[in-house]
């Protein structure tokens, strides 16, 4: 297997028409061109030569930005547009942009209008990776890719069993979902369904107890009695 190394060559009258920034000044051989880096070649003696660009692999669940150089001069974009290939599944590190769920694939850092901080930026999936951007909602608190008025939306999944004669479930698995007790918390959406049936039921959650975060079933005008059985549900909320 061949190992291809990126480099600029200037030898015996042959010039590499590219511009490179490597922790220093741009080597500007051809100023005022639209292209920043041209890696094409007209010397392809073999179909295996000069065909691909290998990006460094990065674990975005551990990655942290070096922000000491963000003075608006050395890195004027505050990493806006930075592209990486992520190898891990999980959540990005707090304080390094908005915490975001990621899976293996290409991501770019979206941080427009910033020059000295990265806190408002977000890693976004790019390309045709079918898994990029997907969030696996679990029975533990899951960070979604949704925000509401700038507030992160979280989600939890569980199931409940009802007798068919009461609005109150007889049991929960693994436990009843409650949202954090907070004066700033709010329910974004509750979905009640039966996995494997293709059926989504109108949910009966009307509000929640702000002192403990427990959901309150029913509504001011009616209560919902589901047929006896076990149902899955997802609660999405802010806190």
Image: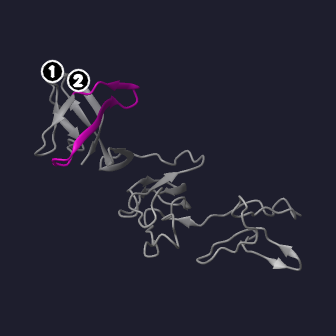
| Residue 114 location (% of width, % of height) | 45, 61
The residue at the point 87 percent across, 65 percent down is 43
Q: Are marks 1 and 2 in contact (CB under 8 Å)?
A: yes
Label 2 secondary element:
loop
Position of the N terminus by quadrant: bottom right
**Colour scheme:** one colour
* In this picture, residue 174 sits left or right of residue 45: left
Q: Is residue 170 among the parts visible in the rendering?
A: no
The residue at the point 41 percent across, 54 percent down is 100
Cα gap from disc 1 to disc 2, whole angstroms: 8 Å
Label 1 secondary element:
loop
Q: Is residue 16 or residue 106 the one in the foreground? A: 16
Please tell me the numbered disc located at residue 233.
none
| Residue 106 location (% of width, % of height) | 56, 55
- Label 1 sits on residue: 165
* In this picture, residue 44 sits left or right of residue 85: right
Alpha-carbon neighbours of circle 1 within 10 Å: few (<14), some, or many (≥20)?
A: few
| Residue 42 location (% of width, % of height) | 86, 62
Find the magenta span and give its range.
Answer: 180-204
Outermost residue, bottom side: 12
Q: Is residue 93 among the parts visible in the rendering?
A: yes
Q: Magenta stretch containing residue 195, yes or no?
A: yes
Does residue 69 lie above or below 206 as drawn?
A: below
Q: Earlier in the sequence, mark 1 or mark 2?
A: 1
Outermost residue, front side: 32
Q: Magenta stretch containing residue 110, yes or no?
A: no
The residue at the point 21 percent across, 38 percent down is 172
Does residue 5 lie above or below 59 as drawn?
A: below
Numbered circles on residues, count: 2
Which of the 4 quarters of the picture holds residue 13?
A: bottom right
Please tell me the numbered disc located at residue 228.
2
Alpha-carbon neighbours of circle 2 within 10 Å: few (<14), some, or many (≥20)?
A: few
């Amino acid at each position: 297997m061949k190992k291809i190394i990126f480099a600029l060559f200037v030898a015996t009258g042959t010039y590499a028409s590219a511009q490179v920034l490597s922790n220093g000044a741009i080597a500007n051989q051809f100023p005022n061109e639209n292209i920043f880096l041209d890696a094409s070649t007209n010397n392809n003696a073999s179909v295996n030569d000069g065909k691909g660009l290998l990006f460094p692999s990065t674990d975005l669940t551990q990655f942290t930005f070096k922000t000491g150089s963000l003075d608006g001069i050395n890195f004027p974009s505050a990493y806006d547009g930075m592209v990486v290939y992520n190898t891990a599944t999980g959540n990005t590190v707090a304080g390094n942009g908005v915490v975001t769920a990621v899976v293996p694939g290409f991501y770019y850092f979206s941080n427009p209008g910033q020059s000295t901080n990265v806190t408002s930026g977000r890693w976004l999936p790019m390309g045709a990776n079918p898994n990029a951007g997907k969030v696996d909602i679990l029975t533990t608190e899951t960070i979604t890719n949704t925000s509401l008025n700038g507030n992160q939306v979280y989600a939890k999944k569980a199931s409940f069993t009802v007798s068919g004669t009461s609005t109150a479930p007889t049991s929960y698995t693994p436990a009843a979902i409650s949202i954090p007790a907070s004066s700033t918390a709010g329910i974004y959406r509750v979905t009640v369904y039966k996995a494997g049936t293709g059926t989504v039921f109108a949910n009966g959650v009307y509000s929640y107890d702000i002192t403990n975060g427990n959901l309150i079933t029913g509504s001011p005008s009616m209560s919902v009695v589901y047929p006896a059985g076990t149902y899955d549900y997802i609660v999405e909320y802010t806190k």
